[in-house]
Image: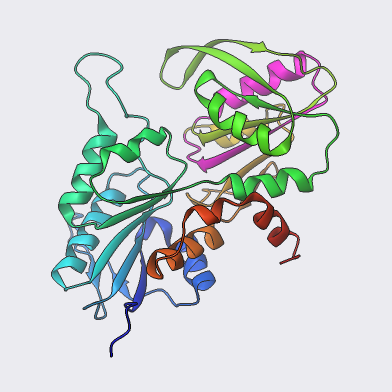
């Protein structure tokens, strides 16, 4: 009698090769063979170079710019469906266009909804991602979405710092809910840096709501793009009497002069995940891997296990210390 669990195959797109190798290793499989040959004009044709018939296929690809990363993922999904894969899951550690989750002014697209539609139309049976900029984006999909939480990765790191007088800070009002979840687990207080923007990526003004005098502050956010907000918040918190300021951000987009901004800021360190590969190493940026979390999520999907069990902070902390 055939097994109820189909053969699993894990593949990587071009933008996420490094983290995909780690995820596959943590799962216990080698990455599958793919190639992305291109024509002289830049057009490319992704190819799956092994059989996936009847398999549960997982394609790992963050959809950060350039847009070719998203297109490559869509073409791989289409290729797998046409090759008779049993199930195709788009594993998107960083879900691009997530900041376009609503119409905040007239005549603009809702990019996150459009991407959800395209992924479904391409043939994805399931999507797995982490720390969506707006959790309600899950509602844009008509297929299952496994929304993983990096809290289980960052909380053990924050605890391992063994800081006194820790207080968490939201760099803007939009991050308040997420920071509150961290504060609840760490049993500490939080403050809010309320900012006003003139335009995208440009902070006009910022004020701190709360007292940080003598505190070791940890800023919590999901995306670090230009790093201007973090740098401005860190300096403001230090001016308000903070003992030190660190930051934790899931997705290191780090565009423009972000690396220089971080290096010259009042931040003691910036801790990020490897959902997006760093363009260069700097003394202030520390990377934690999401490999085990995604590997366990893939295993639980294939074996019909619980995804919510992966969000147990106590288990994650004990595992980090080598106690489990």
Q: Residue at x 22, y 72 (%)?
A: 85
In percent of width and height, residue 210 lies at 71, 13
In screen coordinates, is 9 left or right of 81? right
Q: Quadrant of residue 302?
A: bottom left
Based on the picture, tell me whether residue 225 belongs to the magenta stretch: no
Q: Quadrant of the C terminus?
A: bottom right
200 or 115, which is in the foreground?
115
The reply to whether residue 264 is in sight is yes
Q: Residue at x 22, y 70 (%)?
A: 47
Query: From what the image shows, is residue 206 above or below residue 53?
Result: above
Query: From what the image shows, is residue 3 above or below residue 9?
Result: below
Query: From what the image shows, is residue 253 above or below residue 195?
Result: below
The outermost residue toward the bottom is: 1
Q: Which residues are magenta?
A: 226-255
86 or 32, which is in the foreground?
86
In screen coordinates, is 191 left or right of 203? right
In screen coordinates, is 247 left or right of 86? right
In percent of width and height, residue 235 lies at 70, 19
In percent of width and height, residue 226 lies at 50, 30
Q: Residue at x 24, y 58 (%)?
A: 125
Query: From what the image shows, is residue 164 above or below residue 173?
Result: below
């Amino acid at each position: 009698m055939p097994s109820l669990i189909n053969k699993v195959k894990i593949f990587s797109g071009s933008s996420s090769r490094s983290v995909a190798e780690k995820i596959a290793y943590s799962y216990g499989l080698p990455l599958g063979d793919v190639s992305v040959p291109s024509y002289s004009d830049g057009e490319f044709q992704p190819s799956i170079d092994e059989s996936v018939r009847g398999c549960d296929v997982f394609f790992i690809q963050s959809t950060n710019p350039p847009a070719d990363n998203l297109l490559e993922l869509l073409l791989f999904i289409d290729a797998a469906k046409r090759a008779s894969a049993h199930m195709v899951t788009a594993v998107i550690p960083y879900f691009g266009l997530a900041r376009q989750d609503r119409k905040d002014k007239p005549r603009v697209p809702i990019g996150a909804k459009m991407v959800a539609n395209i992924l479904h139309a391409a043939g994805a049976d399931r999507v797995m991602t982490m720390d969506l900029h707006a959790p309600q984006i899950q509602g844009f999909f008509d297929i299952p979405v496994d929304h993983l939480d990096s809290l289980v990765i960052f909380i053990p790191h924050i605890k391992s710092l063994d800081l006194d007088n820790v207080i968490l800070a939201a760099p803007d009002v939009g991050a308040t809910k997420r920071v509150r979840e961290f504060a609840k687990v760490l049993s500490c207080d939080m403050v809010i840096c309320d900012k006003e923007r003139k335009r995208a990526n440009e902070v006009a003004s910022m004020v701190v709501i709360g007292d940080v005098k003598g505190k070791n502050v940890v800023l919590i956010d999901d995306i670090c793009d230009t790093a201007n907000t973090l740098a401005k918040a860190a300096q403001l918190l230090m001016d308000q009497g903070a003992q030190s300021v660190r930051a934790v951000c899931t997705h290191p987009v780090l565009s423009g002069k972000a690396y220089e901004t971080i290096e010259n800021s009042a931040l003691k360190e910036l801790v990020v995940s490897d959902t997006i590969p760093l363009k260069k190493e700097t003394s202030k940026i520390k990377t934690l891997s999401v490999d085990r979390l995604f590997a366990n999520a893939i295993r639980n999907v294939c074996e019909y296990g619980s995804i919510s069990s992966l969000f147990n902070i106590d288990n994650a902390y004990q595992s980090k210390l080598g106690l489990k």
